[in-house]
Image (tube, rainbow, N blue to C red):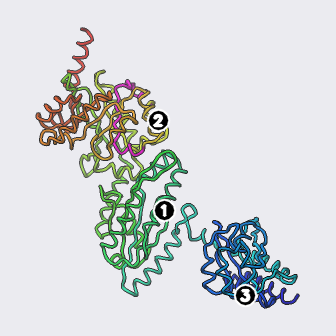
Amino acid sequence: MLGLRALQHDVLEGVARDLPVKLVMNRLCLQAERLAPDVVCSILFVDAQGHLHPLAGPGLPKSFCDAIEGLAVGPQVGSCGTAAYLREPVEVCDIETDPLWAAYKDLALPLGLRACWSSPIYAADGRVIGTFAFYYRTCRGPNALERTIVQACVNLCAIAMEQKERKESIQRLAYFDPLTGAANRASFEQHARDALADAAQDGNGVAIHWIDLDDFKSVNDTLGHEAGDNLLRIVTQRLRAALRAGEFLARIGGDEFVVLQYPAASVSAIEELAQRLARAVAEPVPLAETTASVGASIGIARAPQDGFDLAQLMKKADLALYEAKAAVGRGISFFDARMEARIASRWQMERELEQALARNEFELYFQPIVDLAALEVSGFEALLRWRRPGHGMLSPPAFLPVAEKAGLICEIGEWVLREACLLGATLPAHMRVAVNLSPTQLVKPGFALDVASTIGACNIDPSRLELEITESVLLLENAATHACLTHLRQLGVSIALDDFGTGYSALSHLRAFPVDRIKIDRSFVQEVDIRRETASIIRAIIGLARELGVKTTAEGIETCSQLRMLHSFGCNEIQGYLISQPKPLSAFREIIEAGAERLTAAKRA
């Protein structure tokens, strides 16, 4: 049949020339209608979720196609929806009376459509990817010629529609992130260049928001990469839901996202979007048997203020992100020209920190801890100092955040633990040494074994080592962190919760986490004798700790008045400038020797 061969040739040529599938399918319908003049042809696409989408139907009005758009396939969804659902051809000879059309006959009958024969279109793997239908203006079924035409058309549709799927798959791989479904860097750059070109013409502003998830590495380390992937998917959905017209999201790698804002009318509009994005990320994320909380640091670069070159804008947004992550509190930062100098200074610090251990530039200072019942020194807290060439002696807040970001914190922490244990072993047997831990150390695989090895190498009794964890560890309440703390206590090491009363503190965590001591934060202690409410809180904390069998240490004691009140509340220990500032351990030689003499006398008695 010449007409059928011509139809096949045209469709296959269109597929080979990579013409748009809608164009190819419309041509197929028109030629099929010429071969069978009494029919109206329709081709529907069935998506992966089982919904119908009109692909071609030049003889059908737009209103009819719009009414079909998005319908779910089912056992009584006209001829096409039912054919896709049953995976077999469906012949309806009278739309007005057939139950398959009961809910849809009012769409077809006013158009003079009285009957419909629909056949499923199969992919090579057996999936139903569409339907091919002939509508009739009289109540009848297909004749032999029409059956031949339909068989050929169904096969041609399958070829064209699978070609469409392959193109879309390649498009997704090229421009979309396979994990989250968000646009990828290539897609973002294409979108951004178009927006910048338009902005240069119309005078509107453009903003690039570079987003980095805070604490994402901790989720991966403690809960596993599958949990990390799920978190990224959920965060992507929340970021996408937070967007409005003119805002474009992409994932550009790891835990980093970028949002293009165009037009960016004002600084307040840019800040409003940044806050919206930060709030979307900050919501706790349910993961398997636990929840995770991550925040967002956001760096922002703008056009025209920071130029129109995309590469430079991305670099500046990245610099602003670096600044935002280094900031305390508000994790949103706009690029400014002075930022490059500040960041260069931090990068220089990173390079120097990498060499500091090899050059023996770190030192430990110690601050005495006094037992209020015995009125004697019961131990020392080891505090890190860096004698940075050209800058003098630096305390941890000046350099540890940079070390954390540079991935050096575990290496530095190992040195601190080893040095503190070596020096602690020289103290009288009744004195302990306390060492601060970074959350990064605590989630490091095998950390408890590392501690056990250090204790053995330094020949110190485990009961004389106390490890202080910060309240940020409470955010990592899961089996891994709980197991690590449990293993440390099984070694005989005690655990202290530092800075209690700030940040994320919750008394309920004292039940969940194996803690031996609470260190009441200095911000509370300094108000104990001037604010009644603070005094009441401290008294309650000490009372609760006593009930739970947990000891208390008050940090930051500076006055005798504070000392008397803490003593009256039943606090076990104090620490602060009233006793001594941090100093090298050698500066406390007389205290240590006196403690040793008292211990010897007690043993003789």
**Mark 2 or mark 1, which has the lower sequence index?**
1
Amino acid type assigned to the residue bearing label 1 in the image: Thr
Q: Which mark is residue 480?
A: none
Instruction: Residue 94: give x, y in percent of width and height.
Output: 76, 79
Proximity of marks 1 and 3: CB atoms separated by less than 8 Å: no
Could you tell me which quadrant the C terminus lies in? top left
How far is the residue under mark 1 from the one under mark 3?
Answer: 40 Å
The magenta segment: 453-476
Residue 457 lies within the magenta run: yes
Q: Which amino acid type is marked by label 3?
A: Arg
What amino acid does circle 2 point to? Answer: Ala
Give residue 236's mark: 1
Residue 379: x %, y % from top left? 27, 28
Q: Percent position (x, y) of residue 591?
A: 20, 25
> What secondary structure do most residues of the magenta stretch adopt?
helix
| Residue matched to label 2 | 483
Residue displayed at 25% across by 16% down: 599
User: Mark 3, residues whose alpha carbon is within 10 Å: few (<14), some, or many (≥20)?
Assistant: some
From the top left corner, tell me how far across and down residue 585 is, in percent.
25, 32
Question: Helix, strand, or loop for circle 2?
Answer: helix
Q: CA distance from mark 2 to mark 1?
A: 31 Å
Q: Secondary structure at mark 1?
A: helix
Q: Nearer the viewer, residue 145 or 6?
A: 145
**Side (left or right) of 330 relative to 94:** left
Q: How many marks?
A: 3
Question: N-terminal of the two: label 2 or label 3?
Answer: 3
